[in-house]
Image: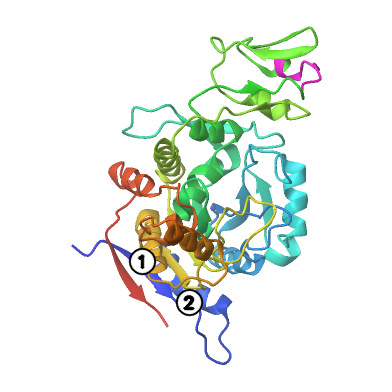
Amino acid sequence: MSGSKVYFTNFKTELGVSYLQKLHNIMKEAGFENIDFKDKFVAIKIHFGEYGNMSFLRPNYARVVADYVRERGGKPFLTDCNTLYVGSRRNALDHLDTADLNGFSFLQTGCHALIADGLKGTSETQVQIKGLDVPPARIGEAIMSADIVISLNHFKGHEVVGFGGAIKNLGMGSGSRSGKMDMHSNGKPRVTRSRCIGCGSCTKVCAHDAPHVTDGLCSIDKEKCVGCGRCMGVCPVDAIDADYKTSSVLINKRIAEYALAVCQDRPNFHINMIMDVSPNCDCHAENDLPILPNVGMAVSFDPVALDQCCVDLCKSAPVVPGSQRDLSIAKMKAESKVIPDDPWRQSNPVTIWEPCLERAEEIGLGSREYEMITIK
């Protein structure tokens, strides 16, 4: 059995052939035109990049995808969900400002950008994941309202789950703020009382009477709290955040489950750009040297096969001198430690990534077996 088809092309070009043309060509070769886009709403799930980070995908690539969708009769929009942490994308207005500053304007991309979970990250759809006895996934409403989902992914390292590709962008990236908390934490929201101003916004939004303001400070009754995360969305000073307790294994598995919630029961297509492979997520307000050279672009209807193929391609890529990966390897050698066999743990030794792909295959999101078809 050959497995799912993954189409790959490197970044070598001939005179007159651009990367944008190569992306269009590889999408066509993979069967993109077999999707019925006619009058369908098409969510292009992307990461707009935290302000200050420069390794996110250029908006030119989003333009290729959006134009192709529109050419086939679809109605594309770029989308992402708000973040849990304090930064330039924690609410829809700041998020859209950041998208514009990073070049994702209508004039540049040819389509509108929607923040899928609304103004404060509380607009969500609860999705029961078929065949799994797990809590419903909390997905940004606009993503779940789309007829078709396309993930356009910057394939790079990640300090918690090893790497970020199609499954990470679909799963963690499509979760509302409470959904992100669900994936990150097996606990409840917690209050940093030194930040609390006692405004009571959290008490007004909670349907379970869990937050209380006593003597000018908030506390949360963990027995009443259901972990929805709405109090985090309304707190004006970010005094309420997630209680990060879950191990990397559980985070990885939950990300895979959320990705299935996004993809089930509708057409989906996935694009990984293995370029500017930073050691950490584009959620950082900075980026470091790439840990390996640019490899190429890969596409597939199977996000699991796609991510596995890209992992394997990166395993054989050389180390960029002076990068976090290079320095980490040198430190492990100096301490006589065993050097891991993949660039993700070489760069961030405490990370683990296999459980995500294992869980994704187990629940039917896709197959880790693949056939790579190389396109010039």
Q: Main secondary structure of the magenta part?
A: loop
Identify the mark at residue 25; answer none if there is no mark: 2
Q: Residue furthest left?
A: 1
Residue plotted at (33% across, 43% down): 359
Relative image position of residue 319 (x, y in whole percent) = 48, 70
Judge the density around disc 2: few (<14), some (14-19), many (≥20) Cα neighbours within 10 Å.
some
Judge the density around disc 1: few (<14), some (14-19), many (≥20) Cα neighbours within 10 Å.
many
Q: Is the image coloured rainbow, by chain, by secondary structure, or in one colour?
A: rainbow
Q: Secondary structure at mark 1?
A: strand
Does residue 36 appear in this view?
Answer: no
Magenta residue span = 196-203
Q: Is residue 104 left or right of residue 341?
A: right
Quick one: 277 or 24, which is closer to the camera?
A: 277
124, above or below 30, in the image: above
Relative image position of residue 339 (x, y in whole percent) = 38, 59
Q: Nearer the viewer, mark 2 or mark 1?
A: 1
Q: Quadrant of the N terminus?
A: bottom left
356, above or below 194, in the image: below
Dot 2 or dot 1, earlier in sequence: 1
Can residue 270 be found in the magenta stretch?
no
Mark 1 = which residue? 6
User: Looking at numbered disc 1 in the image, what kind of residue is underneath it?
Assistant: Val
Residue plotted at (41% across, 72% down): 8
Residue plotted at (60% across, 42% down): 142
Q: Secondary structure at mark 2?
A: helix
* Mark count: 2
User: Looking at numbered disc 2 in the image, what kind of residue is underneath it?
Assistant: Asn
Can residue 197 be found in the magenta stretch?
yes
